[in-house]
Amino acid sequence: MPDTNKPSRRAFLAWSAALAAGAGSCRAQQSPAAGPSLSSSELIELSATDAVQAMREGELKAEDYASALLERCEAGKHLNAFITLNADRVLEAARAADRQRASGGATGPLHGLPMPIKDSVNTQDLPTTGGTPALRDFTPKEDAPVIRTLREAGAIVMGKTNLHELSWGWSSNNLAFGAVRNPYDPTRIPGGSSGGTSAAVAARMSPLGLAEDTEGSIRVPAALCGICGFRPTTGRYPSTGVLPITPLFDQVGPHARTVMDLVLFDSVFTSDEATLAPASLQGLRLGIDRTYDFDTLDPEVERLTQEAMRKLEEAGAEIVEVEVPNLAELVASTAGPIQIHDVVPMLTQYLREFETGISFEELFAAVSTDIKNSFELYTLPGASSGVSDAAYQEAKDVHLPALRETLRAYFADNRIDARLFPTTLVPAVPIDQSADDSVIEIGGETIDFTKAMSRNISPGSTASLPGIVLPAGLSKEGLPVSIELDGPTGNDREILAIGLAVEQVLGSLPAPTLDRSSQSQ
């Protein structure tokens, strides 16, 4: 597979000549730099890395690129990926990027790149709704630090993407702003809570977007939409100015269609501009826990995950079967209790700190029924299934360190480079089967929808592990199935390098057709 990070001038000229002859082909994983002869349908397939390089070198106007992406947004409007999208503002920002380059001004590593932003991240020029009615008209006074960094790098805030209300769920079936729809089948969920960003990236509305993950909200949507997602070690990127659940787990991160674009995003925040080479798969030790991660899988998820492992073994990787001791008990003692305890005080603090003008009581009075029911059951003071202060302290101070130490020892003692597992237990489910209390049948066994989405991803975010999601293939129904690779805390660049290597083996998925015919009326 060619190096998509630094395409040569010869490759660019050869590709342009092929296009002129009618033989051009532009794929997200393989395209050289863009040229002026590319059509809108070809421009939207560019990776962020290639598009930015072409714009920085003057081979592609930012305005032309933004126009192509906005056309795609309009074509995919039925997916309901955006809550706010101002096309005129995006085009003016693109023209400003072109003027800056033409005048000899500095161009950043994300120069001219329109990026969809999850609508839980503060932006000073667009509302930040959190997907909840009470914040519909709230525009923060300043950008969140992550947005400031992206703008300083040259990125354009494309719009604010739809999400599961208050990020409290895995479906992105938002009862206030409408359900986000999966580009591969609009009758199904894209995953949540960052479903709008994943749908936009998968649908070729932009090659790179900003998501956020407390317990799977980057990784579940990436998996169900067949794209790449990266949740870094907690704290690697700034998460201030984002509607919170708990500071112990909340973490922003990218959605993209190529791992190289995840690396590009990471380099913007770490200032690590060194070229990252794919890891060698020869002797790479990938740990799997069949008892925890492979129990009760949809047959297509199991088939495609096994096929992915077979391909990786043939490429030189070693699959090491070893269980993580007491993993289910440790996750159950930490992930849920900490979030349930923290979410109301953290939201209350956010509303006050960022001068939203409303109280938590006012916000709660307007929430949708699904969020209202969940909060009343779990999170409000006196909730019947709430978490006491004593239980919270035990979860935070006893069980959480035990989980993190258990996983640290798992990697070290077994010389595991990364844990490998199917990201979710099932592909995307129909929207009407995605309520928190819904059940799903797998092989004659009934399990909760929440378990199908959250079981496998919970250890990584709870234990502060860097994790990357990669597509493994399409099911027989044409739905994406993905794997996740988690590494030791702090090994972010190493897990990205492994992702680069695995991507070369597994490849990428074909683009969705954005066919409206399967959408429920």
Image (tube, rainbow, N blue to C red):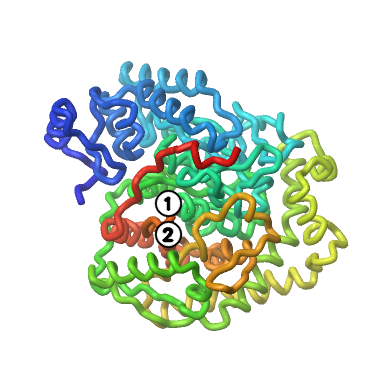
Residue 79 visible in the current orientation: yes
In which image quadrant can residue 59 be found? Answer: top left
Whole-angstrom CA distance, mark 2 to mark 1, is: 7 Å
Compare marks 2 and 1 and give the one earlier in the sequence.
1
Residue 251 visible in the current orientation: no
Relative to residue 55, is residue 229 drawn left or right?
A: right
What x and y, as percent, mark residue 357? Answer: 79, 33
Amino acid at the residue labelled 1: Gly
Amino acid at the residue labelled 2: Ser
Pick the front one: 343 or 513: 513
Q: Considering only vertical position in the picture, is 218 above or below 329?
A: above
What x and y, as percent, mark residue 81? Answer: 54, 38
Pick the front one: 365 or 472: 472
Relative to residue 20, is residue 226 drawn left or right?
A: right
* Label 1 sits on residue: 226
Relative to residue 252, is residue 48 drawn left or right?
A: left
* Label 2 sits on residue: 482
Helix, strand or loop at label 1? It is loop
Dots 2, 1 in contact, CB < 8 A: yes
